[in-house]
């Protein structure tokens, strides 16, 4: 195996360890273990970097051998205050609202035009119509959240 020396300050090593913790946290939120060999390689590398980070006393005090995952990870109090946690939370929020608005716009298009007519649209026509609805929905949710959105369920589901 080819090895490479990399010199990092303790601050840089802490940042790198947090990046690995963020990646592993994302993997942990997936519904199943990643089967892609590239994802598994990332996982192994992140675990290895966290193990190396634990060897530095200035970082080790923030870490513990996590019984749930079986490798060195940051302690809960550190995670709660860590930059990567804020970054990850911001990403989750952004992805949630983006996906919600996108799906609502697509659903509105199909409901307004009907399945048959909507399926006849070219990709460009569909994107143009969905884009204008997304803008209106973004404006609504950014100003009012979900307060004024209404979800109608079929009678058998309510």
Image (cartoon, rainbow, N blue to C red):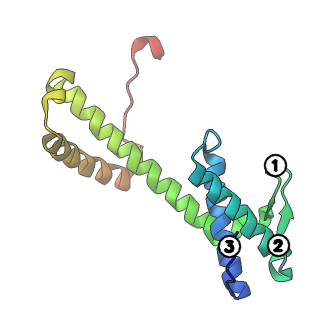
Dot 3 falls on a residue whose secondary structure is: loop
Answer left or right for 144 relative to 79.
left
Relative to the observer, which residue lies in front, 59 or 136?
A: 59
Single out the mark in the foreground, 3 or 1: 3
Q: Position of residue 95 (x, y in %)?
A: 45, 52
**Horizontal and vertical percent for residue 157?**
47, 16
Which circle, 3 or 2, is nearer the viewer? 3
User: Residue 3 has which mark?
Assistant: none
Which of the 4 image quadrants contains residue 44? bottom right
Q: Earlier in the sequence, mark 3 or mark 1?
A: 3
Q: Is residue 84 above or below residue 13?
A: above
Q: Residue at x 62, y 71 (%)?
A: 83
The residue pinned by badge 3 equals: 2
Helix, strand or loop at label 1? It is loop
For mark 2, what is the residue? 54
Residues at marks 3 and 1 touching, judged by CB atoms closer than 8 Å: no
- Please tell me how crowded label 1 is: few (under 14), some (14-19), or many (20+) other residues with Cα within 10 Å: few
Placement of the N terminus among the 4 image quadrants: bottom right
The residue that disc 1 covers is 68
Front in this rendered view, residue 58 or 92: 58
Label 2 residue SS: helix
Whether residue 78 is visible to the viewer of this picture, yes or no, is no
Residue at x 42% of width, y 44% of height: 146
């Amino acid at each position: 195996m080819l090895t490479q020396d990399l010199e990092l300050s303790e601050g840089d090593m802490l940042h790198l360890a947090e990046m690995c913790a963020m990646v592993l946290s994302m993997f942990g939120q997936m519904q199943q273990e990643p089967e892609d060999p590239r994802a598994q390689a990332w996982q192994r590398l992140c675990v290895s970097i966290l193990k190396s980070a634990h060897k530095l006393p200035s970082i080790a005090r923030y870490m513990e051998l996590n019984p749930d995952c079986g490798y060195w990870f940051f302690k809960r109090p550190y995670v709660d205050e860590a930059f990567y946690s804020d970054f990850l939370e911001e990403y989750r929020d952004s992805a949630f609202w983006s996906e919600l608005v996108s799906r609502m716009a697509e659903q509105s298009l199909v409901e307004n035009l009907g399945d048959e007519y909507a399926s006849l649209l070219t990709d460009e026509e569909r994107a143009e119509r969905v884009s204008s609805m997304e803008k209106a929905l973004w404006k609504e949710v950014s100003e009012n959240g979900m307060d004024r959105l209404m979800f109608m369920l079929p009678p058998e589901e309510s």
